[in-house]
Amino acid sequence: MITGLDFIGIPSTDAERSRAFYVDTLGLRPDDSARFEFWVGETCFGIWEPERQGRPFAPQSNAHLALHVDDIEAARAELESRGVDFVGDTFDTGVCHMALFQDPDGNDLMLHHRHTPRD
């Protein structure tokens, strides 16, 4: 019945600020035909402002979007140089490395690199 994931909605209180963070700071590819959509590989991120639809704003928490990088320490250092604050140290789960951070609205994100091959 379900055949894919069409997009991920990112709640924001300021869509322009969020767009700048995701496109300029993180370097995600903006969509050619939608100002508040951008791409991570084949996954579309769509910024939306819940308050404009009469809903309360609440950041996405405890469901970290795992953004793949080939070299987690190099990516982290680059983002730190662009002003991104990480939560704690990069850690190793035994399967992957993770480095947690948030966007300007407090949405949980992570840099992720799987170092153990899948069977």
Image (spheres, grey):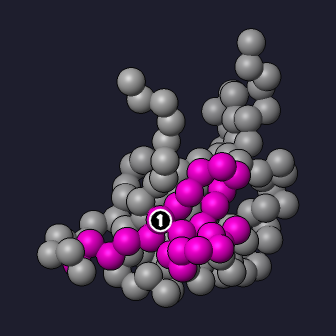
Q: Decide which of 87, 118 is in the foreground and name it.
A: 118
Residue at the spot 49% in from the left edge and 42% down from the top edge: 5
Q: Quadrant of the N terminus?
A: top left
The magenta region covers: 29-51
Q: Decide which of 110, 16 is in the foreground and name it.
A: 16
- Which amino acid type is marked by label 1? Gly
Q: Is residue 9 left or right of residue 91?
A: left
**Disc 1 target residue:** 46
* Dot 1 alpha-carbon crowd within 10 angstroms: few under 14, some 14 to 19, many 20 or more: some
Q: Decide which of 24, 112 is in the foreground and name it.
A: 24
Residue 46, above or below 72: below
Q: Quadrant of the C terminus?
A: top right
Residue at the spot 37% in from the left edge and 58% down from the top edge: 60
Q: Secondary structure at mark 1?
A: strand
Q: Is residue 59 visible?
A: yes
Relative image position of residue 115 (x, y in whole percent) = 79, 32
Relative image position of residue 89 (x, y in whole percent) = 65, 55
